Image: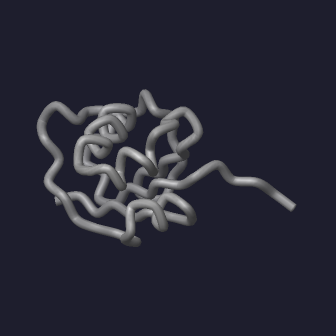
């Protein structure tokens, strides 16, 4: 099982802050994960409709979408971040 944690408007659109899921063997990279999540329902598809702006952290370390998920225990999914 992999723990997914959703932040800000990603959380609001999906309707939950976190969940634990079994990832299929075909999910190898962060991009694979985002594509897989979009198949789980309309709320996921809406939240992740623009995957190029989504930021992802594997075990609290931000990574690019081509990064292998490997044995990550927690995956954080964020909207774009801005500073102020």
Q: Which residue lies furthest to the front in this view?
A: 42
Along the horizontal axis of the image, is 52 left or right of 39? right
Q: In the depicted view, which residue is nearer to us: 47 or 79? A: 47
**Relative height, residue 65 to residue 69 (above, below):** above
Does residue 57 sit above or below 15 in this rendering?
above
**Most distant residue in the bottom direction:** 17
In the rendered image, which quarter is residue 13 located in? bottom left
Residue at the top extreme?
66
Q: In this view, does 78 lie to the left or right of 72?
A: right
Provide residue 2's location: percent of width, then percent of height. Answer: 23, 58
In the rendered image, residue 9, in percent from the top left (x then y), is placed at 55, 61
**Colouring mode (rainbow / by chain / secondary structure / one colour):** one colour
In-front residue for pair 13/34? 13
In this view, the residue in front, 20 or 51, is 51
* Residue 82 in the image: above or below residue 19: above
Percent position (x, y) of residue 48?
44, 44
Q: In this view, does 1 lie to the left or right of 73?
A: left
The residue drawn where x is 42% and y is 51% is: 58
Residue 1: x and y in percent read: 16, 59
**Residue at x 19%, y 58% (from the top left corner):** 21
The picture quadrant where one finds residue 52 is top right
The residue sitting at 53% across, 44% down in the picture is 54
Give the quadrant of the C terminus: bottom right
Q: How many numbered discs?
A: 0
Q: Is residue 34 above or below residue 79?
A: above
Q: Is residue 70 left or right of residue 23?
A: right
């Amino acid at each position: 099982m992999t723990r997914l944690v959703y932040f800000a408007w990603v959380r609001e659109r999906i309707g939950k802050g976190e969940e634990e899921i079994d990832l299929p063997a075909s999910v190898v990279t962060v991009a694979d994960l985002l594509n897989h999540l979009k198949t789980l329902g309309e709320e996921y598809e809406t939240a992740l409709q623009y995957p190029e702006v989504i930021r992802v952290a594997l075990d609290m370390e931000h990574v690019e979408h081509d990064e292998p998920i490997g044995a990550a225990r927690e995956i954080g999914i964020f909207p774009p971040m801005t500073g102020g």
